[in-house]
Amino acid sequence: MSTDLREELDALARTQTFSPDPSAWDRGRRARRRTRVAAGLAAVAVVAAVAGAGALALQPDREARTASGEVVEGGAIPSRIEDIPADLEPTPDLAVGRGAAAFISASQRVPVVVTAADGVAHRLDLPGWSEDGQALALSPDGMNLAWQQAGDGGATIGVLELTTGRQRSDEVHPAGDLALRELTWSPDSTWLGWLGDADGGAYVGRLPVPGADLDLTTRVEGNVTSLAIGNAADVVLGRANGGLYRLAVGEPELITRATGVGPGLSSPDARFVALRSGPSDASSTLRLSDGAVLTHPFPDGTFGSAVVLPLGWLDDRHQLLQVWSAEDQDAELVVTTPELGPTSTWRRSVGWIDASIAGRVSLAVDLVPDLDGTSSQELTHDFPADSPPAPFGIELSLFIGLGVAAAIAVLLAIRWVWRRVLG
Amino acid sequence: MTDRSGFDEFVHARGPALARTAYLLTGDHHLAEDLVQAALVQAAKHWERIETSPEAYVRRTMYHQNISWWRRRKLVETPLQSYDAPVPATDPTVRLTLEQALRRLTPRQRTVLVLRYFEDLTEVRTAAELGISSGAVKSMSRQALQRLRVLAPELADLVGADT
């Protein structure tokens, strides 16, 4: 069968003539050149894509980097402030640069400054720092850090210039033990107010920064809970049994008998004092002209009841508050005005403070940009995570991208040589 | 010998044989010409790689190209009616009957038939050329012969009796 079939197929096939196309060779070679060009372009595209994807994917905290806008001039406050890891070594040089935030670590009882330029937390080995220390305050301009220095009986306040590392110490209560409970700055960062207990009473003091030889310590009878100091060194203090007082020669002058609130921070124009308050549904501000306590209720659907701690004034109207609704939850940074009105502001989620250090943080509020009236303005900054290692001085992501590109180039070269050698 | 002259020499020497196979594969003289030319263009494109055995490359290209073309044509052409109806025995010669019957086979069946009974390849070689299993070659070969018997009963002597 197959022989016959093959013969018939052969006879059938012989009806086909063949006339060679002289252009076949040229067409084939053109196609070859096109393929090579396309392959080259594809290789370049692949290399570029891989390198680009590598660079993008390996950028530290890519989402965070793209989430916020420009860093304000001179640095910014990190959008999230967290306690340091246990293994963080102390920074040897105290001149870490302008600070954005400072706090006492909850886990290690050590002072920490977060620098404004990069959002990096530095554990500081401050001279005279005691694990019992409760007082640490960063000036609103982020240039100075104040803390209590442990001494041999007297109370000493240390002030560190963060950009230069220069330090000064002021013995504010030479006689007897005095436990400093609080340090607070005036809005223009020129005055430091302090509060301590000794001899059954409270001592309130004012320290000019940069220093001047002024004796502005005042003994106040009774349990003073907190104080606020203005640009003119005017002090408002609160007592545990209620009432807000203006520090004066002799006995403090009563401003209001309001209870449940305490002085927080004075406004730059000295018209208001932002108040700290226990669990409530509003933030409170003392108006010094008439002693009225103004309230700004939390908007519906935000906080039910929360503890408020003022962290600074952005200008004469806007205050930055830490609002803490529950002890086990992170505290939120909120920008608001003293009271509700036609031009009032209330903006939450400006930033967050880790629950473990909420209440211990002071901020350089001067780093918050001037408000432009939009709700999308970034008031804090999402700093990228720690930078990855840089092999040969090249950023890691770029290094990996270049490595992949080089590997692809080598493979293409080997393929080309293989084809040339083996045909 | 330059690449170009080697290619020209190959085309001159083997072109007619390739064209004959192409005709059996396609069943159409014009398509056969196109199939050979397309395979030769591919050969020119890869000449440095295949110049030691260009014919095997060109033939394999034709086999696969023909099936690929058929798939594309199948999408746009209307299927034949009464596909397995016997070819009217109007043509007096066996050859023309065979030619018409071959056109009614599928390209894969026709390709297997050409490789097995025109190129005299074994089942294993045919399977290797087409990139399919020997079993598939055997099966397609049997189906092709059966259909030839159905399409052209007068070719029974040529393709053997039904088993």
Image (cartoon, rainbow, N blue to C red):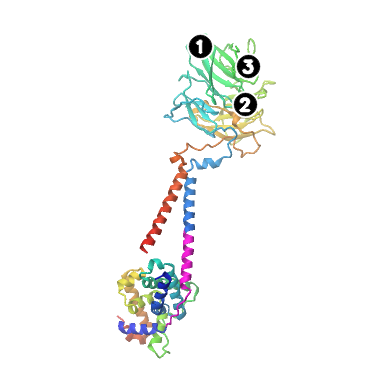
Check residue B140 in the rendering and tell me which mark sits there, or answer none.
Answer: none
Residue ID for mark 3: A245
- Cα separation between marks 2 and 3: 16 Å
Q: Is residue A20 magenta?
A: yes
Dot label at residue A284: 2
Q: Quarter of the image for the N terminus of chain A: give it.
A: bottom left
Q: Where is residue A250 in the image (x, y as percent from the top left)?
A: 63, 9
The answer to the question of whether label 2 and label 3 lie on touching residues, with beta carbons closer than 8 A, is no
Above or below, A134 against B138 in this view is above
Quarter of the image where one finds residue A411 = bottom left
The residue tagged with tag 2: helix, strand or loop? strand
Distance (Cα) linking label 1 and label 2: 36 Å
Q: Residues within 10 Å of mark 3 (few under 14, many from 20)?
A: many
The answer to whether residue A242 shows anywhere in this view is: no
- The residue at which mark 1 appears reads as A154
Counting from the top left corner in percent of width and height, residue B89 is at: 41, 88
Q: Which tag, 1 or 3, sits closer to the chain's start?
A: 1
Q: What residue type is labelled 1?
A: Gly
What's the amino acid at mark 3? Answer: Tyr
- Secondary structure mostly seen in magenta is helix
Q: Do labels 1 and 2 share a chain?
A: yes
Distance between the Cα atoms at labels 1 and 3? 27 Å
Magenta segment: does it hold B54? no
Residue at 51% in and 28% down: A96
Q: Are labels 2 and 3 on one chain?
A: yes
Q: Which chain is home to disc 3?
A: A
Q: Characterize the local packing of mark 1: few (<14), some (14-19) or many (20 or more) Cα atoms within 10 angstroms.
A: some
